[in-house]
Amino acid sequence: MDFARGVENDATVRNALQNQVLITFDAGTPVGKEFVEKYGVAVYPTFIVLNDKGEVLHAWIGYGSAEKWSGVMDEIKADSITLETRKERFASAPTARNAILLGKAYRATGKYSNAVNYFDQALELDATAAKAAEVPFKRIRSLFSGASNGSISFPETVAATEKFLLDPDLDYDAGLWAANTLLRAAGQIGLERIGPLLQVAQTVMLNADDDPSRGDRMQFLAKYSLQIDEDPEQALIYCRRSLPVDWETNSSALNDFAWWCYEANINLEEAEEMARKGLELKAEDGFDKANSIDTLAQILFAQGKRAEAIEQIRLAITMVPDNDYFREQLKVFESNL
């Protein structure tokens, strides 16, 4: 459940908002942009708690859940001091709790170097409490954000990321985030600078043995094989391993596999077969089925079967007549006959 629905429907969220004035901003509007610039917001959703003087009490990124969000609000209401006062309190009597709160607040307001500093101190003061609060993950995300805007050096980020990935207590969801972020960054930063670190990420994901994240890990390894090793056959093996056990009788999984092959531009004959099989399993017309028809149409077009592709995308349009994307696809197909 997202925050807006929580405000409307969840008693836990509503109770946390008692005696508070809730103001929401759309960052795309002029007033929203002004707020974003004033407080250094760079990630959405970001929550900022102000007192009646407009001073920041706390700031953090992400809703998470009604319980998580309300827990943060209740903690701040019970200890409603300004961020500056919390800094002074920490300087005179350092605690892991205040270091964590300060790190979260500085990360949420774009002061990434400060965030990393406080996260480091939280880990030194009480590593157990800091890890329970996901500080290592928040720290690595702050480093990436700081490296992106130039406030933190690239070598520092690389060294910290390697240490993070090699931590025996690594949370694999966090590790996957780092691995996928590195893969996306390779095209921007250059493989010669980030390649060795990507190899570390690949090794960590290969050696992981946690079943819940197996599918996501295999997807990362498939992308790595395609983009870095340029080995489409191995990528296809990892892609198959990422799928659920029942994927050949699961319409959504069949469509996912077919689309992956289309985007990778490999194994298109089998992709066509699986896309058709997935469609046979979808009983009801509508957007979901039309979307799967689009997958088949794209695969047909990529194989040079343009008349068939046009036939399929027209069928999708009959199911969802007002969909602009399908109509644009028809124009693309017809212009390339």
Image (tube, rainbow, N blue to C red):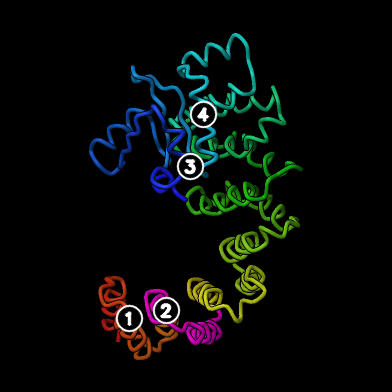
Residue type, mark 1 in image: Met
Position of 209 compared to 262: left or right? right
Position of residue 102 in the picture relative to residue 303 (left or right): right
CB under 8 Å between callouts 3 and 1?
A: no
Q: Tell me the SS state at disc 4.
A: helix
Q: Nearer the N terminus, badge 1 or badge 2?
A: 2
What is the magenta range?
266-291
Rendering coords of residue 119 (x, y %): 60, 28
Q: CA distance from mark 2 to mark 4?
A: 45 Å
Residue 186: image tag: none
Please rate how many residues cluster around mark 4, counting C-alpha atoms within 10 Å: few if below 14, some from 14 to 19, many from 20: some
Amino acid identity at mark 4: Asp
Which quadrant of the structure image shows residue 249?
A: bottom right
Three-letter amino acid code at the position of disc 2: Lys
Q: Main secondary structure of the magenta part?
A: helix
Q: Which mark is residue 289?
A: 2
Mark 2 vs 3, N-terminal side: 3
Residue ID for mark 3? 63
**Spatial separation of the CA atoms under disc 3 and disc 1:** 36 Å
Q: Which mark is residue 74?
A: 4
Label 2: which secondary element: helix
At 56% from the left and 85% from the top, the residue drawn is 270
Label 3 SS: loop
